[in-house]
Amino acid sequence: MVLDKDGSTMRVLVLLAHPAQRKKSINLAMAHLARRIEGITFVDLYAEYPRFSIDVDREQQRLLNHDVIVFQFPLFWYSFPALLKQWQDLVLEYGFAYGPSGQKLSGKLVLACVTTGGSRHDYSPDGGNEHLFEHFLLPLRQTAILCGMEFLPPFLLHAANHIEAEISRSHVDAYPRLLTALWDGKLDLQTARTHASLSTGDLAHLIGG
């Protein structure tokens, strides 16, 4: 079991960044289940900050109060949504998240839970996007590293708008199991770290009883 410094289970914060909530999507279905999990702190950034006026003190305190930071978002134009970038720019301040007197987030875990419109093949050197999916997460990964946090392999679903309903439902249902496993320490992090990304199928082997 993965425990925090006090010997208790991991405190998990989910930050949802989804600007197109008028439309149905797998990402929003995932969020609907995540916000109902007891013990998980769920924050819809676009609902809290519709005008992008981020409360930096509140967001920094949220980070300090949790051990695992989950960024949930759809990949928009090869990057994460604009409000999440604004959140990074303002919240991860010098002297707080990085710098000689910063590193207040050191040792925390970061997990990106991402859906894409493109297929797995699209995210390959000979695919339409010409690069591996992992390349598009490099800014988020390097941000985590700069802040002394560990960037875990992302929980990823490709072609989210074009897959069969059964696959979609399986991914949505797996999301709360992943978050709960992070919270209660039943996710095999050592094995998870050997993956480039995590899928629904991977969780069957990574979550203990």
Image (spheres, rainbow, N blue to C red):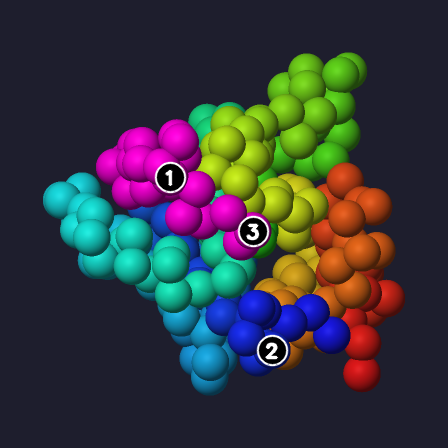
Tell me the tag on residue 7. Answer: 2
**Residue tagged 3:** 107
Question: Which span of residues is magenta-colored?
Answer: 82-108
Q: As shown in the figure, which amino acid type bears the numbered disc 3?
A: Gly
* Residue 143 on image: x %, y %: 48, 33
Please identify the quarter of the rendering in which residue 159 is found. top right
Q: Is residue 172 shown to the viewer in this render?
A: yes
136, above or below 208, in the image? above
Name the image quarter holding the N terminus.
bottom right
Amino acid of disc 1: Gly
The residue at which mark 1 appears reads as 102
Which kind of residue does numbered mark 2 sit on?
Gly
Q: Is residue 203 above or below residue 195?
A: below
Residue 112 visible in the picture:
no
Q: Is residue 156 left or right of residue 208?
A: left
The alpha-carbon separation of the residues under discs 1 and 2 comes to 25 Å
Q: Dot 3: what SS?
A: loop
Figure quadrant of residue 168: bottom right
